[in-house]
Structure formats: structure tokens, C-alpha cells
Image: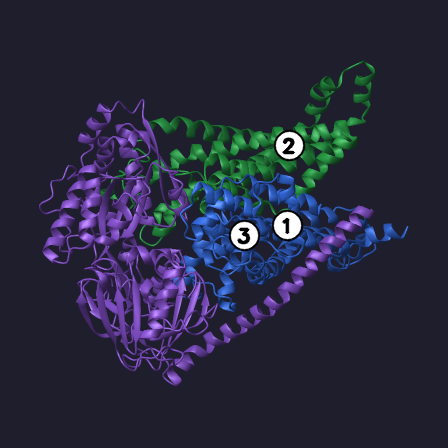
């Protein structure tokens, strides 16, 4: 009993933390002490000091302000994109499972085709073909991530579809939309949410990877991966330009991973 | 099940073909692993043992990246000249003045006839003698393979007689000697088969032994080199666009030299006990080219406003660490016709207030901004930093810049798919002002992507083509500079220095402002 | 399946914004006029319906013709086959190191689950799994190459050059792998037969090596199949950073150069390699997992 409480408590803390991160990133964007893009080359490469707690970069921009500004880009891109693939993937999975027959076979063949490509390679190829830009890189990652949801939701629907209460609902004359939205979806949402929470962090990581390869948002951007990619040139002269965004990335990813784990624990405990 | 079997069969077939293709490659690769492993082990022994000297140098594709070893192909002649493989009839000295190289003497018998006597006893690396006949054939091949040849130097006809090569030009050409320094006119043995991998046989101090385009080149000395035996036995060139990796490779001793070091990296090599930074003011400059087909940019004031927002001083001092000079005219002041003396400048300082007024007068404000697309190279860190500086400045005065980067910019520029292009060119690599004028400023210029056209400029360019007197030529260029500055089709930013950094084991490095030469027979390395 | 893969790869480049005719003409140094563009498009067959173009492309593919690289003007196939061994050496070595690292550590963690060492390893793996691989690569490069000058920065195809790319790949993947191994073994250990074995007086060591590990061979091999994909994906970043001569670097270079034929064939090759590894594993699975094997016999 005590253990159960502990797990729930941990989840609540983490949820508050994540919400705080998201909200904070949004609010802080408009209230930065230094403009994140305005350059001042006469103050380039200042080491961390009082005025600039994380130092300044090659063009005299405040590293701390850029991290905070970029947080919104990195976080919202990841959260919104996961939300989108969550919805699309689930829709495909539910349709396939519920419709069955030829529709199911075709949709599943499509997911199989997508699955034949190593994830990151497909993302790199799609982003490479589409060209740079935040929208394109999100699309590229989306093309990879939706499959998980499609497959997971399909198997979940199949396991629920023939259960007693669905049959009962059918007998009572509920239409397919009502059955899906009222009875099936609510019963399968928790495993999907756990996957989504874990995906946010892997999305942030993959996004940073794409940016690092030059396939991320177009300039100017304070997105963390892109910032790190630029700062790599100055790793010897000004290590703070790359270390601090790296730490920000690390902390965020850890927090979202912990959230996913906590969610799973709570659901496992029932 | 049948379907699955079929899929497996097809996959198996593809895998088999992969293995079949791969196994050849695979064997080679494993062999390569073994040899290079044993090489590293044996290397020190060899260099101490029989006194063979090896120099390893690195640079980005911009400086070292040839597509092939055929001087006639595209810009490859330029790179081969840097490699020390190919040589020209004339060579530029430190003041960008042409001096005889493969030529012994020359004579300008009338306005359109030039008689060159080639040096005796020079052979190509394959042993064949360099005669006027071979040079003629070589030029003929280059002219038919490279479109830039005819626009650089117009030739009517050539005659060859023993060591005497006579060139007839259609019009009087005062700069033919400069033009012949262009490495595109490198001399190679056009009578022998040109090797698809190792390219043409040339006369330079080094000969390629292995060539992987854009990755690695290995060379051995040309023992029969006419200018005296080269000091170094083997040279390995690493070509990579990752500047940090190059820096670290020099720092930990994997390579001995970086050519065309980005100025931002110079601070890593300030320890003079270990490194030397050789610098020469090159003619390379960075500039914005405006697309005059773009509606808003037809207004000269908008172009000038953008030019005013460039912090040239800050850029030269910080991004280029002082290895560049702000440029408000066209050519650098190291050239007799360069600098801004006597030019009436409409943009002469970084002045965002004046720019704001101009943009406002045209009806744009930060709330209702003018949207423009800037394109630039993805690998030019200097220009990327310039655009990062420019963008917020412009945004504050009502111009919203979107930046797109490309590895290969040509097709974007050709298609006119841009408003502003941020570019980097050597403005007068042969010392001849005409080079740039014919590319950028005349109405049908080869690189005039913004479609700038001014009949006075065209007339000046025409006049320059046939003027022999140096001071008269300088006056024409000055006049043309004034017109270009007034019209502002291009905004020049900073003329930069060519930096070569090497560890102190290396001696005999001569940094030439033309960017055409690096490896010579006197380049040496201590063991 | 093959049709699907090739069609998707084809679709990618078909939908890409670049105009191959324009790129080709520019690379030949020709100023592209509208007529020249038209005729080149016709020559390349770009004015035909998509499905016909796809059919042609597929036929060429079967004949081993993957087109010509815009950048180098050489056949894509030979460019790819020259670089594939480099990537395979890297992936296979990294996979080997990963297994050597994570199977013993994962087993150990599972056996002593909840102990101090288990917690410490769990924490470390958590950190590594949350670190972008390029960041790890840069750190390795900074410390191992620059500070202690142990390994070269420019990764030529040599044993010394192999160390850092392999380490980067193996460390990031191991972080994930150790956790998976731990989970698999813990699950197996919860099986009721373990208690039975203990009751029969079998030693812990015998239980672990004689039964638990043997029974876990199947799931572990499946894991390899999955991780092979992320390993291949990881090579793009790692090869670029360490200038390792493999297809990943080739592809990234091709992307910056908008060299679509190379990107396209890269995608096809990677899918084929990935698929064949997984088919191989599917084939091996019954041989390794005694239970599925027995089920087949019924």
C-alpha cells in the first residue's frame, strides 16, 4: 500500500515538473534578459560570469538565454509531434483492427514497409529529401514514429474487441463510432500514453541528431541540437557553448524518461 | 506462405548480390585495414630508417577538393596547381604580377600576336618532352572541355614550332600573361591517355599515386622535376569539411599543415614555439549579391540599407580575428586599382539608423516587414556567422530574412531562386581586374545571377579589354568601381587573408595571395 | 514487401523539391535554358507518368543500375559497394562490443537486482540513454584524441581509427541493451520452474547458466535484430563525426549536396541489409529457443 502511494506521489511530482517545464519554456520566452538572436561581436566568447551565467557564444549572444529560448522549440516540437503521431497512429491502428479484412491487410502491409527501414535512416532520408526546416524534420520523425502507435493500438483493439462488455454494448444497439469512442478507446489509452511519454524523450534526442546533421530547423534557431552543432566548432575555445545546451538536453530527456517509467509503474500497479 | 517464401527468395537474391559485390570490396577493405595498421606501426621506423620524408596536410573541399585530376575539368586545374601537380606557362609572384614559369622568354610581336619560347629540357612526369606542339594540343583540349576557358582568354589560333608557341588573339589583349596564370591553363600531356583515376601527366614537383575525390590524395615526388629535386618524398592530403577535426588533427600531430585555415580557428595555434601561421592578403572577399529581378530589391535604397546593416568592422575583427579588412569598395587596397581612395561612397559605415530611415521611406516597418530570402553555402562558417549577425539587424528595421543554405549553390543561383546571395569569391586571383568584372558586373556576366545591367559599366569593361597602359587601366577600374558602388548590385563585406598554419617542423611555405600555389619543390619537413 | 520498400524509396525522391534536369545541367557547367531543361527532362524520362518512371527505375535496380551520382558523376552502385564494407565493419564490431558489455552486465544486474551495483549501473545507463550520441562522440574525441592523444581524429580504415566510433555506438546502445537484458532475465527468473530447480537442490550458478541463460537465448537474439537497425542509424552521425569512410557519411554528404540518387540507393541498401538480418534471425530463432523448437515438433 505504501509502495503504491510512493509510486503515485512520484508520478505527480514528475507530471508537475514536466508541465512546469512546458509552461516555463513558454512564459520565459518573452522575458529574457538578453535577446537570444541579437549579436554583439564585441562581447564574443565571454566565459560564464554574473551578467552571462552560461557565458556568450561566438557572436556575443547569451548562451543561457538561447537555451531557454530554444527550450520552447525543442520541447513543443517534440510534444506536439508525439501528440500528432499518437493520434494518427492510433487512428490507423483502430481502423485496421475494427474494420478487419482487406483494410486491415493493406494498412498493416504499409506499416510493415515503413518498419523495414531502420528508424533514424528513414528520418534522415525523408528530412534530406524534403530539405531543412522545423516542419520538415518533424514530418521526417513523424514518418517513423507513427508505426509504433498503429501496431500497438491495433493489437489492443483486437484484444478488447471480443470481450464481454463490447458484445454487450453491441447487443444494446451501440453503433461502431460509439463503441470505438465510448468503450474501446478509454480501455486502451494507458499503454499508449506510457509509450508517448517515453517517445517524447526519444523524439527530442532524434531531433537533436537531425539538427546536428544539418537537417533541423532553418536559421536562425536556438534549437538545442542546432546550437550544439554550431558550438562544436568552438569546443576548445569556448566549451560552455556546447556543454550547457548538452546538459539542458540531458536533464530534459531524463525527466521525460522518468515520467514514462513512473506512468508505467502506476499502470502496472493498477 | 508462398508469398513469404518469394519475399525471402528475392531478399536472398539481393543479399547475395550485395555479398558478391561486397566481397571484392570487402577483401580490399580488409587489406586496407591491415596495411594501414601495419603502416602506422612501421611509419616511424621508415622515417627514421632510410630518411624518407612524409608531409600530411589537410584542408576543406573548397581548397583541396578536386573532382578529378584532369586540369581541363571544371575547377580541377586550380586544385591541381595547389597540389603541386600541374604548372602553367606563367606564375604569379607575391604582388600578383605574372612571371615566366614553363616559358623561357616571350615577345609581343603585334597587338594580337604573342610568341612564347618554352624552356628546354622539361619533361612531363611520364617522361615525354614538353614541346610547343603538346602545349597547343593541351590548350585545344581544355578549350573544348571547359566553357570558362574561352571567357577567360579568347584565342583565335595557335601555331607550334619546336619550342615556339605562337598565340593569335582576336583583339588586343593586355592581360594575356595574367590569364595564362589561371591554372585552368595548366600544361599537361594531352598526347597520352589520361588516366581515369590518376589523371593527366603534368610537369609539377609531385605526382599523384592515389586519388579519392573529395577525400584523400597521395603523391610522390617527381624525381625528374626540372626545377630541382623536391625535398619531401611523400605527401598525403586529407580533404574534409569538418574544420574541428582538421584542427584537432593538427593539434595531436596527425597532420602537419592546414591550408586555408578559417580565421576563427587561428586562436588555437598562437603558440609560436609549435606552430606558424603564414598569412597573405588574398583577393578573396565575401559579398552579398542582390537579385535585381526581385521586386523590392529594384529599389537601390533598399540594397544600400541592407549594406549599411552589415557590421563590417565587427565582422573583420571578431569573426575573422583581425585576419580580414572591412571592404566598402570592391577590390582590396593591396591592388593598385583597389581600395576606396577617390571613390565617393554612399555606404561608408555600419549605420542602422540611416538604414532604418531608408527602409521606412520605402514603406516597410518591423510590423509590416519586407520578406527576403538569402541563400548561402552550408559550409562557409564565416558567411553563416555574417548572416546570423545581419538577420536580427534587418529584422529590427523591417526586413525579415529567411536563410537557406546549400552545399551546391549554383543551381539555386542559376534558377534565380533567391533575393540575396551571400558569396565568397577570389576577386582577382590572376591580378587582373577583368576576371571579376566579366563574372559579376557586365550584363551577360557568367556569375551575374542578379541580372545587374548598366551600359556605362559594360562600356568600361569593353574599354578595359583593350587598354594596355597600367595607369589608364587603373583609372577605368576606379571609374567602374564608382558606378558599381552607386548602383550597389553587390555589397562587398571584407577582404580576407589566406592563412596557412603548420607545425614548426615544416619549412619553405610560401603563402601566395593568388591561392593558386601551395606545394613546391622547396617545401620541406624536419624528421 | 520488396515492392513496398522500393516504392517508398522511389516516392521519396519523386516528391523531393529538386529538379534532376536542372541539377544535371548545372553539373555539366551548362547554363540551363528552358529548352535545354525540357529536352533533358525528356531524355531522363521525367515527363512520363510516375508509375512508368517507377517501373523503369525498378527494372534498372534489378539490373544493378542505381543511377549516377550528381556529385561525382560515377555510378551510384560502385560508390555504395565501395563504402558498405566500412559501415558493416563498424556496425558488426560495435554490436560485438555491445554484447560483450551488456549481456554480462545485464545478467549481473538481474541476478543481484536491487543491490547497490544494480542501482549504480541502472543510473549510469539512464544517463547514457539520455545523451545524444553526437555529444558523446565529441566528448570522446576531445578527451581521447586531443587531451591524451590516444586515437586519431581522422578515422581512416584502421584498427586505431575504429576504436572511437565503435565506442560511441556501443556505449549508447549498451545503455539501452543492458536494461533490456536485465528485464528479459528477470522475467525468466520469475518462472515457476526456477523454484522447482531450487527445490531440487540445484546450485544458483547451475540455474543461471544451465537454464535461465539458455532459455533467454531466443529473446536476446531478437534484441540483436532490433538493435541492428538503430546501430545502422547511428552510423550516420558517428561516421560523419569521425570521418569514417562508410555509407552513413556518404549519405550525409549526399544530402547536403542534394545528390538524390545516392540518398535513394542508400535507403534501399539499408532496408535490404536490415531486413535480411531480421530474416536471418527469424530463421535462427527456433534453433536457439528450445521451447519454440519443441512446439514446432508437435
**Residue that lies at the very extreme toward the bottom in this rendered image:** B50
Same subunit: marks 3 and 1 = yes
C-alpha separation, residue under disc 3 versus residue under disc 2: 30 Å
* Marker count (numbered): 3
What shade has chain B been given?
Answer: purple
- On residue A89, the disc is 2
**Residue that lies at the very extreme toward the right in this rendered image:** C298
Q: What crowding class fits label 2: few (fewer than 14 Cα within 10 Å), some (14-19), or many (20 or more)?
A: many
Q: What crowding class fits label 1: few (fewer than 14 Cα within 10 Å), some (14-19), or many (20 or more)?
A: many
Closer to the observer: label 3 or label 2? Answer: 3
Out of B58 and B441, give the one closest to the viewer: B441
* Residue annotated with mark 1: C271
Q: What crowding class fits label 3: few (fewer than 14 Cα within 10 Å), some (14-19), or many (20 or more)?
A: many
* Residue found 18% across the figure and 70% down from its top: B107
The chain letter under disc 3 is C
Q: Is residue B110 above or below residue B413?
A: below
Q: Is residue B33 left or right of residue A159?
A: left
Q: How is the image coloured?
A: by chain
What shade has chain A been given?
Answer: green
Q: Residue C38 placed where, x, y %? A: 50, 42
Q: Residue A171 placed where, x, y %? A: 83, 16
Closer to the observer: label 2 or label 1? Answer: 1
> Which chain has been coloured blue in this picture?
C
Q: Secondary structure at mark 2?
A: helix
* Residue found 41% across the figure and 73% down from its top: B191
- On residue C262, the disc is 3
Residue B302 in view (yes/no):
yes
Residue C113 in view (yes/no):
no
Q: Secondary structure at mark 3?
A: helix
Amino acid at each position: 500500500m505504501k509502495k503504491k502511494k510512493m509510486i503515485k506521489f512520484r508520478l505527480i511530482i514528475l507530471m508537475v515538473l514536466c508541465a512546469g517545464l512546458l509552461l516555463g519554456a513558454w512564459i520565459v520566452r518573452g522575458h529574457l534578459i538578453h535577446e537570444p538572436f541579437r549579436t554583439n561581436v564585441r562581447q564574443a566568447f565571454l566565459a560564464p560570469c554574473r551578467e552571462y551565467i552560461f557565458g556568450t557564444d561566438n557572436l556575443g549572444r547569451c548562451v543561457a538565454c538561447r537555451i531557454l529560448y530554444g527550450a520552447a522549440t525543442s520541447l513543443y516540437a517534440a510534444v506536439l509531434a508525439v501528440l500528432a503521431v499518437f493520434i494518427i497512429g492510433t487512428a490507423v491502428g483502430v481502423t485496421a483492427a475494427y474494420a478487419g479484412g482487406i483494410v486491415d491487410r493493406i494498412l498493416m502491409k504499409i506499416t510493415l514497409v515503413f518498419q523495414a527501414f531502420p528508424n533514424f535512416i528513414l528520418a534522415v532520408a525523408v528530412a534530406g529529401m524534403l530539405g531543412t526546416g522545423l516542419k520538415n524534420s518533424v514530418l521526417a520523425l513523424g514518418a517513423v514514429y507513427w508505426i509504433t502507435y498503429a501496431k500497438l493500438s491495433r493489437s489492443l483493439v483486437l484484444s478488447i474487441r471480443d470481450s464481454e462488455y463490447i458484445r454487450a454494448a453491441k447487443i444494446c444497439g451501440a453503433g461502431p463510432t460509439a463503441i470505438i469512442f465510448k468503450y474501446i478507446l478509454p480501455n486502451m489509452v494507458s499503454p499508449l500514453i506510457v509509450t508517448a511519454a517515453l517517445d517524447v524523450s526519444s523524439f527530442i534526442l532524434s531531433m537533436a541528431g537531425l539538427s546536428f546533421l544539418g537537417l533541423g530547423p532553418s536559421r536562425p534557431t536556438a534549437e538545442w541540437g542546432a546550437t550544439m552543432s554550431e558550438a562544436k566548432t568552438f569546443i576548445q575555445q569556448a566549451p560552455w557553448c556546447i556543454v550547457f545546451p548538452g546538459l539542458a538536453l540531458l536533464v530534459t530527456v531524463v525527466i521525460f524518461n522518468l515520467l514514462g517509467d513512473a506512468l508505467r509503474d502506476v499502470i502496472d500497479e493498477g | 506462405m508462398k508469398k513469404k517464401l518469394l519475399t525471402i527468395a528475392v531478399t536472398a537474391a539481393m543479399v547475395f548480390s550485395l555479398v558478391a559485390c561486397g566481397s571484392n570490396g570487402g577483401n580490399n577493405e580488409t587489406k586496407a585495414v591491415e596495411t594501414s595498421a601495419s603502416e602506422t606501426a612501421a611509419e616511424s621506423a621508415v622515417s627514421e630508417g632510410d630518411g624518407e620524408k612524409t608531409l600530411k596536410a589537410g584542408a576543406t573541399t573548397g581548397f583541396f577538393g578536386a573532382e578529378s585530376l584532369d586540369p581541363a575539368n571544371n575547377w580541377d586545374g586550380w586544385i591541381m596547381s595547389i597540389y603541386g601537380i600541374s604548372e602553367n606557362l606563367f606564375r604569379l609572384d607575391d604582388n600578383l604580377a605574372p612571371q615566366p614559369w614553363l616559358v623561357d622568354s616571350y615577345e609581343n610581336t603585334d597587338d594580337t600576336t604573342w610568341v612564347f619560347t618554352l624552356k628546354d629540357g622539361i619533361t612531363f612526369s611520364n617522361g615525354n618532352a614538353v614541346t610547343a606542339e603538346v602545349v597547343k594540343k593541351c590548350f585545344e583540349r581544355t578549350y573544348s572541355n571547359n566553357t570558362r576557358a574561352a571567357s577567360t582568354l579568347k584565342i583565335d589560333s595557335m601555331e607550334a614550332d619546336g619550342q615556339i608557341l605562337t598565340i593569335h588573339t582576336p583583339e588586343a589583349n593586355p592581360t594575356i600573361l595574367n590569364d595564362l596564370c589561371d591554372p585552368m591553363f595548366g600544361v599537361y600531356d594531352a598526347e597520352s591517355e589520361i588516366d581515369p583515376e590518376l589523371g593527366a601527366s603534368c610537369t609539377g614537383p609531385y605526382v599523384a599515386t592515389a586519388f579519392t575525390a573529395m577525400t584523400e590524395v597521395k603523391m610522390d615526388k617527381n624525381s625528374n622535376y626540372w626545377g630541382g629535386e623536391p625535398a619531401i618524398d611523400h605527401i598525403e592530403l586529407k580533404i574534409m569539411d569538418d574544420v574541428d577535426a582538421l584542427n584537432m588533427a593538427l593539434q595531436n600531430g596527425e597532420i602537419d599543415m592546414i591550408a586555408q585555415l578559417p580565421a576563427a580557428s587561428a586562436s588555437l595555434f598562437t603558440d609560436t614555439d609549435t606552430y606558424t601561421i603564414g598569412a597573405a592578403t588574398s583577393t578573396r572577399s565575401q559579398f552579398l549579391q542582390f537579385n535585381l529581378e526581385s521586386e523590392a530589391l529594384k529599389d537601390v535604397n533598399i540594397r544600400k540599407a541592407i549594406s549599411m546593416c552589415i557590421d563590417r568592422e565587427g565582422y573583420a575583427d571578431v569573426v575573422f580575428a583581425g585576419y580580414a579588412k572591412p571592404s566598402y569598395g570592391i577590390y582590396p587596397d593591396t591592388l593598385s586599382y583597389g581600395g576606396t581612395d577617390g571613390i565617393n561612397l554612399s555606404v561608408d559605415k555600419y549605420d542602422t539608423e540611416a538604414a532604418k530611415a531608408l527602409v521606412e521611406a520605402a514603406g516597410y516597418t518591423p510590423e509590416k516587414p519586407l520578406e527576403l530570402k538569402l541563400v548561402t553555402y552550408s559550409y562557409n562558417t564565416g558567411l553563416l556567422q555574417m548572416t546570423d549577425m545581419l538577420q536580427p539587424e534587418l529584422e529590427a528595421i523591417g526586413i525579415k530574412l529567411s536563410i537557406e543554405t546549400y552545399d551546391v549553390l549554383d543551381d539555386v543561383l542559376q534558377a534565380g531562386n533567391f533575393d540575396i546571395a551571400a558569396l565568397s569569391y577570389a576577386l582577382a586571383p590572376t591580378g587582373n581586374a577583368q576576371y571579376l568584372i566579366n563574372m559579376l558586373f557586365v550584363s551577360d556576366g557568367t556569375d551575374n545571377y542578379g541580372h545587374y545591367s548598366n551600359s556605362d559599366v559594360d562600356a568600361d569593361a569593353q574599354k578595359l579589354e583593350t587598354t594596355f597602359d597600367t595607369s589608364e587601366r587603373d583609372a577605368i577600374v576606379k571609374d567602374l568601381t564608382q558606378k558599381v558602388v552607386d548602383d550597389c548590385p553587390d555589397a562587398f563585406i571584407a577582404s580576407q587573408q589566406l592563412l596557412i598554419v603548420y607545425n614548426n617542423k615544416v619549412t619553405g611555405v610560401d603563402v601566395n595571395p593568388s591561392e593558386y600555389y601551395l606545394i613546391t619543390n622547396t617545401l620541406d619537413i624536419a624528421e | 514487401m520488396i515492392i513496398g520498400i522500393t516504392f517508398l524509396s522511389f516516392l521519396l525522391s519523386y516528391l523531393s523539391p529538386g529538379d534532376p534536369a536542372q541539377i544535371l545541367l548545372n553539373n555539366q557547367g551548362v547554363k540551363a535554358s528552358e529548352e535545354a531543361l525540357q529536352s533533358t527532362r525528356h531524355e531522363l524520362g521525367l515527363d512520363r507518368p510516375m508509375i512508368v518512371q517507377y517501373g523503369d527505375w525498378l527494372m534498372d535496380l534489378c539490373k544493378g543500375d542505381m543511377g549516377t551520382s550528381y556529385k561525382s558523376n560515377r555510378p551510384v552502385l560502385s560508390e555504395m559497394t565501395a563504402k558498405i564494407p566500412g559501415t558493416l565493419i563498424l556496425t558488426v564490431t560495435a554490436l560485438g562490443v555491445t554484447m560483450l558489455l551488456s549481456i554480462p552486465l545485464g545478467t549481473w544486474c538481474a541476478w543481484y537486482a536491487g543491490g547497490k551495483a544494480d542501482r549504480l549501473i541502472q543510473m549510469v545507463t539512464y544517463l547514457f540513454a539520455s545523451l545524444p550520441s553526437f555529444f558523446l562522440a565529441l566528448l570522446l574525441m576531445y578527451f581521447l584524441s586531443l587531451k591524451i592523444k590516444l586515437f586519431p581524429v581522422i578515422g581512416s580504415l584502421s584498427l586505431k581509427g575504429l576504436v572511437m566510433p565503435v565506442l560511441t555506438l556501443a556505449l549508447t546502445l549498451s545503455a539501452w541493451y543492458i536494461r533490456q537484458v536485465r528485464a528479459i532475465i528477470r522475467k525468466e527468473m520469475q518462472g515457476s520452474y526456477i523454484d522447482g530447480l531450487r527445490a531440487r537442490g540445484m546450485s544458483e550458478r547451475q540455474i543461471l547458466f544451465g537454464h535461465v541463460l539458455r532459455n533467454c537465448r531466443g529473446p536476446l537474439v531478437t534484441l540483436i535484430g532490433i538493435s541492428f537497425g538503430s546501430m545502422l542509424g547511428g552510423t550516420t552521425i558517428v561516421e560523419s563525426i569521425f570521418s569514417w569512410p562508410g555509407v552513413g557519411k556518404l549519405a550525409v554528404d549526399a544530402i547536403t549536396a542534394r545528390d538524390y540518387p545516392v540518398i535513394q540507393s542508400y535507403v534501399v541498401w539499408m532496408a535490404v541489409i536490415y531486413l535480411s538480418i531480421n530474416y536471418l534471425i527469424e530463421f535462427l530463432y527456433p534453433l536457439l529457443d528450445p521451447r519454440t523448437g519443441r512446439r514446432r515438433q508437435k
